[in-house]
Image: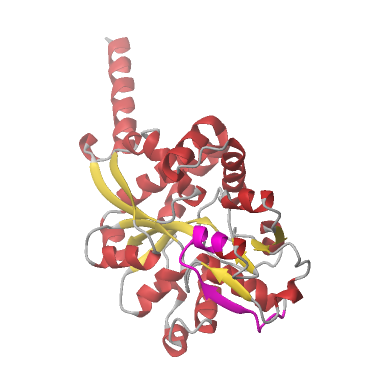
Amino acid sequence: MHRRNLRALAFLMFGLAALSTVGDAGAIDKIQFPYSPISYHSLPWLVAYEAKLFEKHGLEVDPVFAGASSLIVQSMLAGEADLAGMAGPAVISNVLKGGDVIQVAALVKSFSVPLYVQPSITQISQLSGKRVGVTRFGSVSHFTAKAILDRSNVADAVVIQTGGYPESMTALSTNAIAGAMIPAPQSVVLREKGFRELVSIKQIRDMNIRFIEQGVVARRAYAEKNSDIVKRFIQAVYDGLKRIHDDKSFATKVLSKYTKVTRQNMLDESYQASIDAFAKDPRVPAEVFKDLAEQLVGLKLIDPAAAQKTPLSAYYDNRYVEDLEKSGFFKRLWQ
């Protein structure tokens, strides 16, 4: 009898542990998840999706590429999505317009788009008075280019928007621009054609410019009401990141499926870029939004007075990551 009771108790404890992972009574929570861009920057949730790691946490997630971050914010404000994957600057613009989109996890906390230039250019000062291509004004490539040029005292370089990385490559190849921000895997093609990587990702990171290049955002009202779902979503995404670290073959297959890149050397470069870029701790540094706001003001993309009177806490909420830290989730994941 005593042994039977112990067995029943063990079974009950196992069942409760399983329920704590997948939610109330094993219910599946459905999530529409718009994200940007289609590149290694989105690999953790794409791997989580393909490896069915969201299901492990009781979630049915539909990841949908949605283009620019501004379009993602619009879909969230329209009630079409509650969680999304995008860079941090759009969060500030949204909050200053009265929206409630906040950052709940920061996956990439620095710039990871290098600067490529014409073969004849060997120093950044040679970009003075010349055109440098970015995808769109207000994009990650725009922020990166401005940060590099400002730190290098090349204020008179002319930054233009090309529309996308393929368009930037074409403009560089036709000598329409002197330089462009180009990430992996397109960077492989540029080097093969003789273009020069003038400022590397490592050099950019050494500038210590705080930024959120990729992360998970949520509507504040939704997150406060559904904190368990938000935490399970972050767990699944980080299970995806762990799978990336542990299984390069699977990760590059997923990358190839979504980016349509098939050349192994290009996939290898993207894979390594993802390993280098993603933070193992997704806590949002409070100070990063101070820096982001200053950058947006400098680019004349937000109202300085509105930014100054808005508290940094309006842009992010670390409680979900902190709860996971307290539970030991990240420690167990990376040990």
Establish if 92 lies above or below 52.
below
Q: Is residue 299 left or right of residue 223?
A: right
Q: Is residue 186 left or right of residue 55?
A: right
Q: How many marks?
A: 0
Q: Which residues are magenta?
A: 153-170
Residue at image location 41% in from the left, 39% down from the top: 48
Residue at image location 75% in from the left, 67% down from the top: 121
Q: Position of residue 305 (x, y in %)?
A: 44, 90
Name the quadrant containing residue 258.
Answer: top left
Q: Position of residue 3 (x, y in %)?
A: 32, 10
Residue at image location 48% in from the left, 84% down from the top: 300
Of 22 and 164, nearer the camera is 164
Which residue in the rendered view is the most extreme toward the right?
122
Q: Position of residue 175 (x, y in %)?
A: 63, 67
In magenta segment, residue 53: no
Of 35 and 218, nearer the camera is 35
Of 29 and 253, nearer the camera is 253
Name the quadrant containing residue 206.
Answer: bottom right
Here the colouring is secondary structure
Which residue in the rendered view is the most extreme toward the front?
174
Q: Quadrant for the C terminus, please.
A: top right
Name the quadrant containing residue 218.
Answer: bottom left
Establish if 8 lies above or below 113.
above
Residue 243 seen from this side: no
Residue at image location 68% in from the left, 52% down from the top: 191
Establish if 24 lies above or below 191.
above
Q: Position of residue 58 (x, y in %)?
A: 29, 38
Q: Quadrant for the N terminus, please.
A: top left
Residue 48 seen from this side: yes
